[in-house]
Structure formats: structure tokens, C-alpha cells
Image: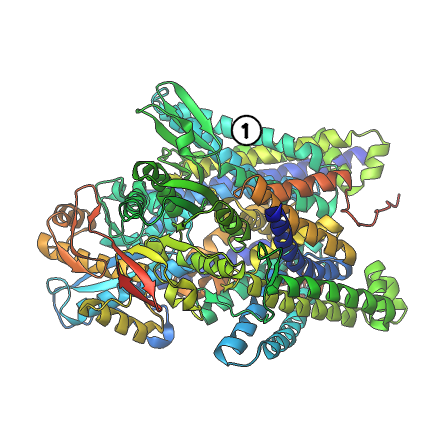
Amino acid sequence: MKKSMKKLLSVTMAVAMAASLTACGGQSSGSGTTGADTKASEGAKTEAPKASGEGTIKIGGIGPITGSTAIYGQAVMNGAELAINEINANGGIGGAQIEYNFQDDEGDTEKAVNAYNTLKDWGMQVLMGTVTSAPCIAVGAESSNDNMFQLTPSGSAVDCTKFENQFRVCFSDPNQGSASAQYIGENKLATKVAVIYDSSDVYSTGIHDKFISEAGNQGIEIVADEAFTADNNTNFSVQLQKAQDSGAELVFLPIYYSQAALILAQAKQMGFETSFFGCDGLDGLLNVENFDTTLAENVMLLTPFAADAKDELTQKFVASYKEKYKETPNQFAADAYDAIYAIKAASEKAGVTADMDASTICDGLKKAMTEITINGLTGENMKWTADGEPDKAPKAVKIVNGVYNAM
Amino acid sequence: MMSFISYFINGLSLGSVYAIIALGYTMVYGIAKMLNFAHGDVIMIGGYVVFTVVSTMGLGPVAGVLLAVILCTVLGVVIEGVAYRPLRMASPLAVLITAIGVSYLLQNIALLVFGSNPKSFTSVVTIPALKLAGGKLTISGETIVTIISCVVIMICLTTFIKKTKAGQAMLAVSEDKGAAQLMGINVDGTIALTFAIGSALAAIAGALLCSAYPTLTPYTGSMPGIKAFVAAVFGGIGSIPGALIGGLLLGIIENLSKAYISSQLSDAIVFGVLIVVLLVKPTGILGKKISEKV
Amino acid sequence: MDKSNKTNFRLSKTLKSNIITYGLVIVAFIIVQMLVNAGQVSSLMKGLLVPLCIYTILAISLNLTVGILGELSLGHAGFMCVGAFSSAIFSISMLETIPNAGFRFFLAILIGAASAAVAGIIVGIPVLRLRGDYLAIVTLAFGEIIKNVVNVIFIGKDSNGLHFSMKNAMALNMEKDGKMILNGAQGITGTPKNATFLIGVLLILVTLFIVLNLIHSRSGRAIMSVRDNRIAAESIGINITKYKLMAFTISASLAGVAGVLYSHNLSSLTATQKNFGYNQSIMILVFVVLGGIGNIRGSMIAAVILTLLPELLRGLNTYRMLIYAIILIFMMIFNWSPKLIDLRKRIFHKSRTERERV
């Protein structure tokens, strides 16, 4: 009897709790402008001022802002917010202000779909996201169903632009893999190459696979092909040792800079001197807090974005990003910034107004995306093809004395 | 051959870090009979303290490690008092879940305070690398310090438990809480002391882990934490020499399987070996045999 | 005479309790369905309906292992992973062969359940010889192994049939018309979205039917006797291994069913730490412990609350998971602390005696 009472009590408590939570959940989605305002202290709300009578266009964002991939999601969230603030200050999209809401997906497919649905409830008209590939594919199935325009800043897997409504700002993975192999081959950087990649990561395996198959055509011999996984990504002694033993002249790192920083440090610890070559994921290396930049000396990378580029657009972006978020922006932030400007350009081309529904906007944007050309942080004269791929060229840079130098 | 020795030594170094973390697991388990899943995150906090002191405030590595030890000790005692003590008499499963909650809490606090960007950790070790066999074999300073500290810690702990009153009290509590209480031992105090020691070890482990693999994120502690937990079970959970053997074996197996079998499946292999060991010796290598009361 | 009366009373009580449990699911389904039809449900809620079914099934199935069998399993997500991947591979490779989505999904569920059951037997035979925390750590190890191995499997299909490799996609040597089905860590994309709320609820009811019937059957009592006193059970001739393995396998195959729902609800399936790693296993365990070990209904409710909680906290943004952690700790202490339980009992009793006096 006592036991059943305890049960009853816990059930009632649970129900009461659920009810109260539903209530507060409802409230927050009702007010609906919480998205960009993650650093509450800064009060960085992107709520539209009431001045213009044109209404607001609601842009949603999805990416991991907690969990082990939070670093990428937070960069995208901030980069996009910066662009939106600028656009709003300059009169918005065709007079309409942008309202921005960024939802967390923890880097998980299921949570990403939940985030997408949350944004739909909020009244999202255009989606900028998701940040990582697997969630992007999962959300793509939903967004194509709803005919919601989706522009991913950094979802690089091939399937991220599977549907007509999906576009991306970054390069696709195979694109980078073959570009890297060609660059190494054409410039005769090395003939014996070792590869260290993250076999549990879509981005890394995508580049790796293409690189390996293209390497043969370029006269490159793969002397060591070593993998690591997300669960085991701090100890690289074995992979480096194998690369060293194989006599590799160059180590290709199709990975993100957080692991690359570790690889460089450990290579130094074990006295392995070689040259390293990477893709856009390596950008950000020099800005890892407290990183000894001499370790990155002579590292080469193909990247569309460099935070210390001399052009005015990049310098302005980096300065305002640093001021607002106290960090140097990486490639993800730049991609997101460009994504928002691409949406702006396409919206103006298609004549999007705030009172259109998401599906009408999507039809307009799908067509307009292939017609626009924008000068962004990650490329000049960027154009898009109808299958969602950007048309831009990566720049090869080499790190000398702690700064990028064009090669 | 040279590369084999090198893989082996690197494995030894990795294993020593696992061993120090496993010591914390094993002590807490032996006395409080709980799996403290938040242990790995205390390591991460320790790492951040050292990082802040050394890289941001510019003090020396010794000050950093000392401060980390002090703060982590306090943190460990607070966690025990607030989250675990109310559940002392409840099902061990309830405490396990609470520990998970604490683990999430620590990770998210670190995420909010330090951000998601990885920090590059300045090694607390200043000894230069040892070059052997005409430069063919390099043993890094971190490796040497890690292995030495592991052995020193083990010896100190064993002496502490055997020779001091507090250590004996720990043994008594781990055997039988009720009887220990009747003998006038302060059970709550002893358990708090265990958590204090375990967390202090976690701080040291954090400093060494981040020195050998110099990166720091809010999730730095979770995977080494789980591995060390496996190491503790490997050696026989509750046994101090067991934690050392388990940790070292785990590190060596992990590195060698990475080198000679598959770098992607090394974790699977480590877990596979664990299963085989437990099937042959159900309580781990040095575990006590459980006699069953009928 | 007296005795038979007593058993009668007990039987009717379990029957009543079972009816309440089934009723709860059916009523919840009807209410939600009515709200959906009336257009009162947000997209978020609609999207959460299938995941809620998934986690409810997982909670029930793990409760069979933890609550009824009395063994701690930290690898439940591994069985879910097996069910998810085997059924997704089946669905994709049979996309053209079996055009009827309903029938194909039905087969997929059976395949998911069967392959998870096989995994359950393979894991169960060695594991169930161990006890307590050692068993827990071995299940954790198995869960991690399953996840790791899935990440290095490559399966492709071309005109010559299926190709299999554990090295990389190139090693499949497929013809030009080849199509990747399972691409290592990049997982499976394009699984048909067959899982619906109705199917989810039906599967919950089937799960409940299986588990509740098992508990109240002869085998169920044997299983619980093993939990309560292994030696006594053994001494009266109960085949411990058989019953343990039976409960464990059923529990695994039900987790496999949840996995089938999972993979057929999302178009992209990858095995990560987040969805099939030990973190997920522990989350399922949280449902069971919070809802009450052995209390099927409680664990269902806990699964629903804890799945909704992080979604409802979305307004908090980066503070979301922090608050979630604090609520989790608080709920555990509130529900399990002996002192608080005493306190609650006292208040409850007081009010009851007062009421009786009136």
C-alpha cells in the first residue's frame, strides 16, 4: 500500500512538473526572439526595430552550441548574427528587418530535427543550417518536404545538397580532396605522402577518400594511411610514428584544427620533422588559445578564408567579431556570415517580402541563388549552381612567422 | 624493433595517466561503493585551473598544479556532500545516475565559463626529451614525468593506507560501514577524505594528461575517464595495485593495437580484451574473490 | 479458503494495474491524436511523437533487464544500434524489390528485433556469468564495441548484388551502377521515413504486452526469484542461465525495435557517441532509475518527461543543458534520498490521518 502511494506521489509530481514545464516552454516559444541572444549579458538581441513598416523576415539557424562539436556551432551562430545585425542596421532586406533564432542540435540528427521543428513553430521563413553534415542530411529530408529554403554554411558531405531546396557555402568534401591532391601533385610538393584522418567524421573521410583515389593520378604515393576516431583523438603518437617510419615527405591532414594543433605538438614532442598540408578545416589553427604558433611554421593549407587577409571586408569582419565575441573568427563564422549575405542577395533578387510564406520564398530563392554573384569572406564572385554547390576557388596559403602567406 | 619500443613506451605513458585516474576511481569505489562517473570531469576542471594559472595569470607550473590540487579537492568534497551524501543509503544505481548529472553539470559549467574553443595547454613539464640509440628513440619529458609520478603516487597511497590511522579507517569503512561506525570511525568524514584524495589525484592526472596531449576542451575528461574506469575494473576495482596494473596494461594494449591491428578499432580491441579478462577472472586481475553468503 | 481468496485479490490487482498501464498509453494516444487533428499541436511536438515512442520502448525494455532481472546493463544503446542499422540496410536494399512501404517496414521491424535478439544472445551468454558492476562494465564494453565496429563496415549494392568490406569504400570494387548503402562512419542516408506515431504506439503496446505478460507468467516469477535470491532459486531447481538469458534477449530485441523506429524516423543514420554510445545507454538507465526500478509505468513516464525536458528548455539556449543537469540531480535526490522519502511519507500520512479524523 505504502509503495503504491509512493508511486502515486511520484506520478503526480511528474505530471505537475511536466505541466509546469509545458507552460514555460510555451511561453518562451511564444515570445520567440530568444535565439540569437545567447550571451544574455551583452543583450545582443536581433529583434527588429519597429521603425520600418515592412515587417520582418524570420531566419532560423541550427547547429551544435553544446556538446563536443559546440565550437563549430557557436562560430556559425555568431558569424550569422554579426551579418544580420549589419544588414538590419543598413535597412534590412528590401526594407524588411531580419529576425534571427538559432537552435541547438548538440551535433545529433534527432535533436537537429527537433530544432528544425521548433523553428517552424516560431515561424521561420528561411533556414541557415545545419552546421554539421549528418544533422544537415536529416534536416534536409524535412525541409525538402516542407519546401523550406535551406542554406548550410558548413555541411560539406555530398548528400547535404541532395534536394533542390538545399544550397551550401563551403566546398563539398570530394571537391577539397581532389583539389588537395592536384595541388600537391602539380606543385611537386612531395611524392611520398602520409595521411592522418578522422574516420568517424564525415568531413574528414569525405576528403580522405577522394584524396586517396586522386593521388594515383598525380603521381603521389600514399606511404601511410592512418585513422583516428572521435573517441580516441588525443593520442596521436602511433599515427605519427608510422608516418615517420614510412619516410613520408609530407603529412596530409584533412581534419579540423583542434586535432591538428595536437598533432603538431606531438610531432614536435617526438622529434618528427616534416611538412604538413591541410584543407579549410585547418583554418583557425593559429587562433587556438595559447597555441605555440612556431609549431605551425611551414604548414600549408587550402582555405577559402583567412582571418588575417588584408582585404577590407575580412578586416572589418574580424575586427567586429573580435570586439563582440572576444575571439578570432574561424572559417565557420565566415561561412555563416557569407550565408546570410547570400540569402540577402538572393532574397532581393527574388523580391522576397516579409509576408510571403516559407514555400513561396523557397521557390523564389531556389531560382535566385543560381543568378546571384556575391563577394564574400570565403571567395570573390561566388556563384551557385542549381545543384547547390558554390563555385569558388580555394587559396593555398603557407604559415610563415605565424601568419598566412599566399603561395 | 625501435618503433616497437617506441609504441611500447608511449603506451606506458598513456597507461600511467590512466592509472592515476583509475586510482581515484578505485578508491572511491572501494569505500563508497559507487561508480563516480563525474571523476573524468574533475580531471577536466583540474586542467582548466592549471591552464588559467599558468597561461592566463602567468604563474609557474608548480603553483598551477598546487592550486588545481587544492581547488579540485574542495570540489570533490563539495560534490560528495551536496549530491552523493543525501543518497548514501539509497540504491547504488540512484547515486550512479546522480553522478551522471554532476558530470553533465561540470561539463556545461566549463562550456559556459571557458567556451567551446579548445585551449592549447602549456606543458607543466620542463625536462627535455631523452634521446636514445643515437637519436632513433625519443622519450619525451612528459612521458618520463608521468611514469615517475604514477609510481610515486602509488607508493604514497599504499603507505598512507597501511601506516596511518585515517588510512586504516578507510580500509575499515570499505570492509563494513556499519561495523566501522560502531568502532567509532567517522564514516562520513572518511568518505569525504576519500573523495578529497581521489579529486586531488584527478587534478594531478589532469595536469599530466593535458601536458602529454596538450589540448583542453570541456569534454577532455570524459573519454579518459571512461577508459580509466575500464582500467580500474581490469585490475580489480577497489585494489590500488590493480588500478596501476590495469591502467598500464590498458595504455599498452591500446597503443599496440593501434599500431599493429587497426587504429580505428583500438577502442573495440581494448574493450574486447577487458571482456576476455573478466570472463577468465570475473573480478579483474587483482580483484578480491567474492564469497557468497547463503 | 483464505489462501485462495488472497491470490484472487492479488491477481485482480495486477490485472487492474495492467489495465491502467495500457489505458494510459491508449488515452495518451487518443488525446494527442485529437489535438493533432484539431491542429493544436506544434511542429516540435509532432516531431517529438515518434522519439517519445522510441524512448518509452527503450525504458520498458531496459526495465526488464534492470528492474525484473536485476542486472545493471550499460550497453542498451548497442542493441538499439544493431536494430537500427540492420533494419535500415534491409529497407534500403529492398526499396525496389518490395514497393509496399507498410509490408517492408513490418519486415524491417522483425529483422531489427531478430538481429538485436541475436546480438543479445551473443552478448548475454558470456556476460550473464558475471555479477553486479562487473556485468555493467562488460555491457558498456559491448555497447562500445558494437558502435566501433559499425563505424568500419562498408556495404554497397550493384548489379552483382551486395558487397561488403571492413576497410573502405574503394575496397568494395563495385560496378559503375553501384550504390553505397552503409558508408562506414558516414553511415546510412536515405532511409525511408516509415515510422509514424500510430506505429510507435502500437509497438509500445506490443512491448508492454510482452513484458507485462512475461512478468506475470511462470517464467517471469522464475526470473524475479533469480533476482531476489539467486542461491535459493538455484536450490529449488530453477535454471538460472536459461531465465537470465531469456529476459536479457527479450530486452535486447525490444531495444532493437526501438532502433528500427529510430532509423526509420530520420533520413541520416550514423553511429556516434551521442546516439548509440554509452551516454545514450546511461540516459535510458536514467529513465528506469528515475521512474522506479521495476516500475514499468513509472519508467514510461520518466522517459516522456526526460525526453521533453531538454526540448522545453530550448528558450534557455546555452544554459539549457546546465539547467537540465541541475534538474536531473535535484530529481534524483528528491526521488531517492531516504530522508526526503521519510519526510514525504510523514507529510502524506499526517494529511491522511487528519482527513480520516474529519
Identify the residue at horizontal 70%, vertical 71% (top origin): B196
Quick one: C344 or A100, which is closer to the camera?
A100
The quadrant in which residue B95 appears is: bottom right
Vertical arrangement, residue A247 with respect to residue A342, above or below: above
Question: Where C170 falls versus A288 (above or below)?
Answer: above
* Subunit under mark 1: C
The three-letter code of the residue at mark 1 reads: Ser
What is the quadrant of residue B25 in the picture? bottom right
Vertical comparison of B137 with C262: above or below: below
Q: Is residue C123 left or right of residue A358?
A: right
Q: Residue at the spot x=17%, y=72% of the render?
A: A89
Residue C305: x %, y % from top left = 50, 53
How many numbered markers are drawn? 1
- Judge the density around disc 1: few (<14), some (14-19), many (≥20) Cα neighbours within 10 Å: many
A205 or A153: nearer the eye?
Answer: A205
Question: Mark 1 sits on what residue?
Answer: C115
Q: Nearer the viewer, residue C146 or B208?
A: B208
Q: Is residue A327 left or right of residue A315?
A: right
- Under tag 1, what secondary structure? helix
Q: Position of residue B270 (x, y in %)?
A: 63, 44
Q: Residue furthest right?
A: B183
Question: What residue sits 54% from the left and 64% below the top?
Answer: B105
User: Where residue B55 sits in the image (x, y, percent)?
Assistant: 50, 76
Foreground residue among A96 and C9: A96
Q: Quadrant of the C terminus of chain A?
A: bottom left
> Would residue C297 be seen by someone viewing this image from the given angle?
yes
Color scheme of the displayed model: rainbow
Quadrant for residue A351, please give it: bottom left
